[in-house]
Amino acid sequence: MNYKTIELQILQLEESFSKSRSNIYSDQNKESHFKELHDLFISIKKSDLKSFLLGDLQNHFHILNYIFKGLEYLDNSTLNIIPFEIISCLKHALNDWVKKDNIILVTSLSNKVEGFYFEVAFSEEYFIQINNYIGALYNISITHRLIRICLPKVLSRDYLSSVVLYHELGHFIDSELNISKRLLANEHSVSLENASNIEQKFYHHTAEYFADLFAAQYVNDSLSIYLNHISNGSVDSLTHPNTNKRIEVVSDFLLSKPNDEITNINNALMISGNEIFKKRHQTIDSTKSDFKNLIPQSFKSKEELHSVFKLGWDCWNNSDTNFLKEFKLRQKYQIINNLIEKSISNFEVVQKWNENK
Amino acid sequence: MERKQIITSNGANIKPTKSAMSKKIAKFLGLNKDGILFKDEINKLISKGELTIVPLLEEDQIGEISIDLRIGTDFLAQQQGRDAFIDTTNDQITSRPIKSHFRETRRRTGETLLLNPSQPILFSTLEYIKLPSDVYGVLTLRSSYSRLGLTLSSIIQPGYCGCASIEVTNNGSTPIKIMSGSRFAQLRLIRIKRNSNYFNSERKYNCQVRPIASKANEDKELNQLKKFLNPNS
């Protein structure tokens, strides 16, 4: 690596900024994050790259990469693109766990239909390190940290599959609270960096159970139903437990049945001073819901709001016999998605209206 | 008082009876069972769950004979695309869909949108509506907006459910800025004598919550018409 590497990165980023500068974001924090990234970029551009030692070059390589990634997610989080309604539900769930106000939930849309994931890089530790470095060098700081969740572009308005996003948010909470790493250390007395294959498997499986249980707090067994549809009888892998085991753990949680995975995770949560996993949703009976009259569901609380996804799945699973039975398949799918979207947006707009009266 | 004679279509003269006269007056005043619905009737239907308008942010949206509806958050703005014209006659997978002639854009409630001269804009009302099966709706602009050179005229079928679709064009020469969430249209509700099941016929728009571009090219009769010229098609 030499200064030409950084020069090339700067030129590529310049292109990226020229495309992103006209973005209109869904909230103020994203706009200010964009501005801070741009200020940092301008400072780097003005610096004398030829005078940099290898360490500085490497640091700048990482920082420019950080800016690149930030822009990628900001570009996909404009008001026109971001799946606004599901993000508003995730924000409520996030607020239950993380009280910091310097976090922004951003999404990127993938062209892959299986492209649901949480991007783990750039932890809080990394964020602090970058801020310390740029603070000393350029007298600049980045205020907001991004939670970066990727979802398939084609499914950005599919509210049945979007329950996966609760699971992905669970991964962020896990990394934030350090639960799976803590359990790995307790069980195998080893850190993730030095873990063997079996130990890594333990860590990854624990992280998956954590994310599944996190989601189940809000969306009941909706994620299990979806997993069942897409897993095609999967078996244990290094990164994921088999689907049947995952479904069983969630089922035990919802039925309050004893289960080692749940006990271990809850103990770790408790020891680290957090609340344990519990049902944070209020189930709505689909046969008595507003949906059966083809109107959006009204909610009295956030707990009911999260249940809209379970309600949607219940309506879909029984759509051959329930109020949707006379509709064509495509209509059933559209109706459920439309009703979920409008139920969420009605809840949000009424709340904001009442707050600003 | 002398009753006026009514001349029927076959030329016969009949004198209206007293009850026919009072029905006509009642209808004129909206006091009959069919005809335009008044505030108290609208509220009664809502409280019985037979009419849905959600969210109803303010009670005073329901006026004496109409309901104010607000601008939603999603818009479709017509734009000149690659093709020179919008083809409403073709629904083949290889032809460009009508929606490709529209640009989708979103606003947060409280944000603004420009209505440029001569550019058709489609959007949905903020309110989701479900009408009783014996009531249809007439959608017009609030007069404050008609006075700006905007036009809108639309009918909502009995039993319809979804956000009302608004297609508006600025006929003036000056762009007009509008705000998402503001009261824009008026809905008058008219009761009819018979029930009508909205879903009796196959509908193109089901519980829609966002504006949807025209589906004129999905009309099934188009294929039948094409066979007039080419029976083997």
Image (cartoon, coloured by chain):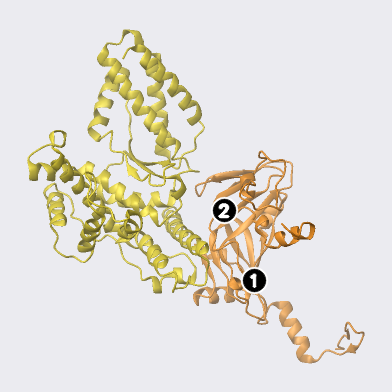
Chain colours: A yellow, B orange
Q: Secondary structure at mark 1?
A: strand
Residue density around tag 1, few if under 14, some if 14–19, many if 20 or more, within 10 Å: many
Residue sitting at the far front? B232
Residue at mark 2: B182
Q: Which chain contains the residue that carries disc 2?
A: B
Residue sitting at the far right? B11
Q: Nearer the viewer, residue B164 or B217?
A: B217
Alpha carbons under labels 1 and 2: distance apart? 23 Å
What percent of the width, then of the height, locates residue A154? 46, 48
Quarter placement of the C terminus of chain A: bottom left
Q: Is residue A118 visible?
A: yes
Q: Quadrant of residue B185?
A: bottom right
Residue at mark 1: B136
Q: Is residue A146 above or below residue A294?
A: above
Residue density around tag 2, few if under 14, some if 14–19, many if 20 or more, within 10 Å: some
Q: Nearer the viewer, residue A156 or B221?
A: B221
Q: Which chain contains the residue that carries disc 1?
A: B
Q: Secondary structure at mark 2?
A: loop
